[in-house]
Amino acid sequence: MAEPLLRVEKLVRRFGGIVATDNVSLDVAAGELHAIIGPNGAGKTTLISQLTGHLEPHSGSVSLAGRDITYLPAYRRCALGLARSFQITSLLLDFTAADNVALAAQAHAGTSFRFFANARKERSLRDAAHAALDRVGLLHRADVVVNRLSHGERRELELAVALASKPKLLLLDEPMAGLGVTESQRMVKLLQELRKEVSIVLVEHDMPAVFALADRITVLVYGRVIASGDPAAIRANEDVKRAYLGDQHVVTHHG
Amino acid sequence: MKSFTVSKAVTALVLAGLVLLPLYSQLSGNIFILTLFTRIIILALAAASLNLIMGFGGMMSFGHAAYLGIGGYAVGMLAQEGVGSGFIQFPVALAASAMYALVIGALSLRTRGVYFIMITLAFAQMAYYVASGLARYGGDDGLTVYKRSDFSGLIDLSNRTQFYYLCLACLLGVVFLIWRIVNSRFGLVVQGLRSNEQRMQAIGFPAKRYQLVCFVISGTMCGLAGALLANNTDFVSPAVMYWTRSGDLMVMVILGGMGTLFGPIMGAVVFLLLEEFLSQITEYWALIMGPLLLLIVLFGRGGIMGMLGRAGRG
């Protein structure tokens, strides 16, 4: 098997006495959509934060395309092709949608230590922004200030911002969180399109969406991987069933 | 948006007034008003520089008056040592301010929020006490500048009108620069960091180095105001660095409208005119000034520019 795009090895992160990430290892191959699921408090967001560089692990390693990125700051990882969306929407609220995306494009197009020319008139940046907005179906809202966008639109804008940096790997932290039924369906359709272009790690609670989208699924419970495999295998897995039916102690003993 | 608005009209009026002021002063024989407005323009320049980091960059520096002192002392100390040329004094004033901003910024930007406010304040107070200890340069009593900066016949700083226009040109030049900066790539990054630092890191911008460069640009601009101020008063003392002066600058920015191009000018004009006229009426002018400012800040969201903007929309 070729070098995986993302390799996580024996990652450990503790908060006081609680082991939030307990010896987690997983590989994401290029082109794969890899979903991470687990009950509340399973340590999904803690894991994602270590992948993006917002949190340092206590031991273990993370590598992207063969390069060790375990202790790189977030902005350096982004330069290497790792983009993320936030579970709780995190955008520049007083900027327009187009500005939000154009800034992401700007971060990957030469130096930003330019003090004189009007950046909003840079054709290449505006074009990149509009292309990414078009990709998620938000082009008609390009000049609207984010404050005035709906929650669903903001989730789509998060995706556009992530796409504008032309990432190799997209980390999506609950992109469906808080979306209505139709909005969720649109998001699933959108992700189905995007997965053709970019590898994706998807953390999500919406099980139908996960099973419809994922090539492989990793299940976390109490910070540990209890199962990893394709959707059919996960569906049939006894430990996973038990975890979701609530008897988590049994699962951790099996661990 | 090239439409006519109330705020644009008022801004244009104020600018036109500033340009024509020397004419009025000459015709009416009122020299005092020219002196007063020279001071207002210099402090407006300082406020504009503070607005770059505070309004656009979201960095609440509470030690901005330090640069007024550093710029001023550069001029005063060089003059004392016999270096009277403005071509040396002004670059030294700017360079010294930039150096100070670089060191203070690098240390202060490790902190956020209230801590940033407190640490910038602390450094400015340190500068104040260092200046007070400079026995050779007057210490506590300050330093008289016997001869204004000499620009070898190019411009005469002792001529009130010429000096006034030099200050006005510096102010407009700085505002022009700030206008270019805030719309540039760099400016957008700095404003993005004000809005959401976590998001900016995630899309690939290292926050601190952009903020530090912005901090240095702002400090250098304020150093220019300091050099002009020393020439204006023919005197520089530790008092220009005192924390109340930093507070005055912050009030001017907030009063005028944070993060607006001309807000600091409006703020400086209104603040200093109020101070001037109220202090003529009563010794206890601060008793009126304080509540007045409080009311404007409480009910006039966005300061003067904000109120004018709302007036424009009816």
Image: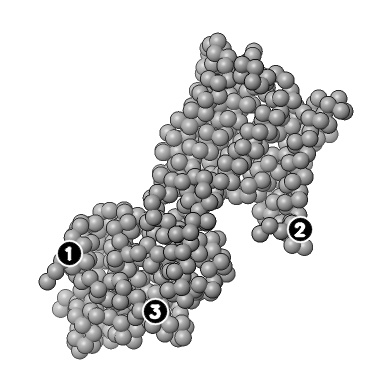
Q: Position of residue A121 (x, y in %)?
A: 52, 56
Residue linked to disc 3:
A190
Tell me the SS state at disc 3.
helix
User: Is any atom of residue A137 visible in this view?
Assistant: yes
Mark 3 and mark 2 on one chain: no
Q: B209 or B180, which is in the foreground?
A: B180
Q: Residues within 10 Å of mark 2 (few under 14, many from 20)?
A: few
Q: Quadrant of the N terminus of chain B?
A: bottom right
Q: Chain of mark 1?
A: A
Q: Which numbered disc, 1 or 3, marks the residue that appears first in the sequence?
A: 1
Badge 3 crowding class, 10 Å Cα cut-off, few under 14, some 14 to 19, many 20 or more, is some
Q: Chain of mark 2?
A: B
> Circles 3 and 2: CB distance less than 8 Å?
no
The amino acid beneath tag 1 is: Glu
Q: Position of residue A159 (x, y in %)?
A: 41, 70
Q: Secondary structure at mark 2?
A: helix
Placement of B84 over or under A118, stated as above or below:
above
Left or right for B273, reference B242: right
**What is the chain identity of the residue bearing mark 3?**
A
Between the C-alphas of marks 1 and 2, the distance is: 61 Å
Q: Quadrant of the C terminus of chain B?
A: bottom right
Which residue shows up at 29% across the image and 58% down it? Answer: A80
Please, what is the three-letter code of the amino acid marked with disc 2? Ala
**Residue drawn at 41 percent across, 46 percent down:** B208
Marks 1 and 2 share the same chain: no
The residue that label 2 is drawn on is: B311
Q: Quadrant of residue B221?
A: top right
Q: Is residue A3 left or right of residue A101?
A: left
Question: In the rendered structure, which amino acid carries the disc numbered 3?
Answer: Leu
* Residue identified by numbered label 1: A9
